[in-house]
Image: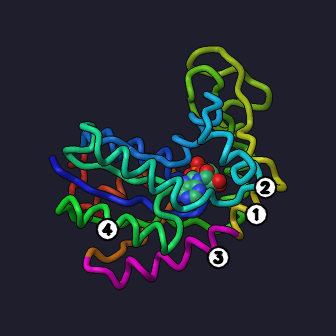
Amino acid sequence: MDVRLILMGPPGVGKGTQGELLAERFGIPRLSTGDMIRAALKAGTALGERVRVYYEAGELVPDEVVLGLIAEAFDGPATAGGFLLDGFPRTVSQADGLGALLAERGLKLDAVLSLEAPERELVARISGRRVCEACGLVTHVRAVGDDAPCPECGSSLVQRSDDRAETVRNRLAVYREQTEPLLEYYARSETGLTAVDGLGTKEAVRDRLLETLQYAESPA
Ligand code: AMP
């Protein structure tokens, strides 16, 4: 099914987790600019080296870098049947750039969803987030306990370098200043914007998102 979605929301609200679930449900790729940047950092590519200082400080990387990554993804075969954008766009200029990329290809967005949660919950989620160095699992100390190995593959769980307490505050401030204006931008757009409560279990939030998209699962 052709579905083109944007999943917006502050750091720690669950965009990655929910984005995965929705993408799987619709059989579309999740395009996460954050994941693309982390892959470039890990591989030590020129692009990775160019954006490292921004990433480590919790600042946004330059608009043209992420627009280039998205344009490249749009030109690949994986996005022919739709996509879910996670963590992009994050500035008005990126949203304008996305609009141009879509228009050039004769495409339209189906929905823009905004996941919401109070700031204290975001800080708690981010500071306890752990990722597996080997298999990429994202989990939380609340689920696995302190210093536990990855429950999937047994490798080490680590904290993302931009999840440290001093960087988290900056990421939240950057979100408020640079990304929050996009909520109004999309609310006024032809597609519109739907806010969804991001609190609760991951299944509860997923069902809310699906209901919003009017593809809710029938009760078991
Ligand atoms: P995320 O994984 O989406 O939380 O992104 C982690 C970091 O990657 C951000 O704090 C930025 O440094 C960078 N980043 C990811 N997506 C974007 C974007 N659309 N625009 C600028 N910087 C981004």
- What residue is rendered at 37% in x and 81% in y? 187
Residue assigned mark 3: 177
From the viewer's side, name the closer residue of 69 and 214: 69
Q: Quadrant of the C terminus?
A: top left
Q: Is 103 situated left or right of 188 in this image?
A: left
- Rate crowding at label 1 as few (under 14), some (14 to 19) or many (20 or more) other CA atoms within 10 Å: some
Residue assigned mark 2: 167
Q: Is 22 situated left or right of 106 in this image?
A: right
Q: Which residues are magenta?
A: 174-190
- Rate crowding at label 2 as few (under 14), some (14 to 19) or many (20 or more) other CA atoms within 10 Å: some
- 156 shown above or below 50: above
Labels 1 and 4: the sequence-earlier one: 4
- If the picture is divided into quarters, which one holds ligand 1? bottom right
Q: Are marks 4 and 2 in contact (CB under 8 Å)?
A: no
Amino acid type at circle 2 is: Thr
Q: Are marks 2 and 1 in contact (CB under 8 Å)?
A: yes
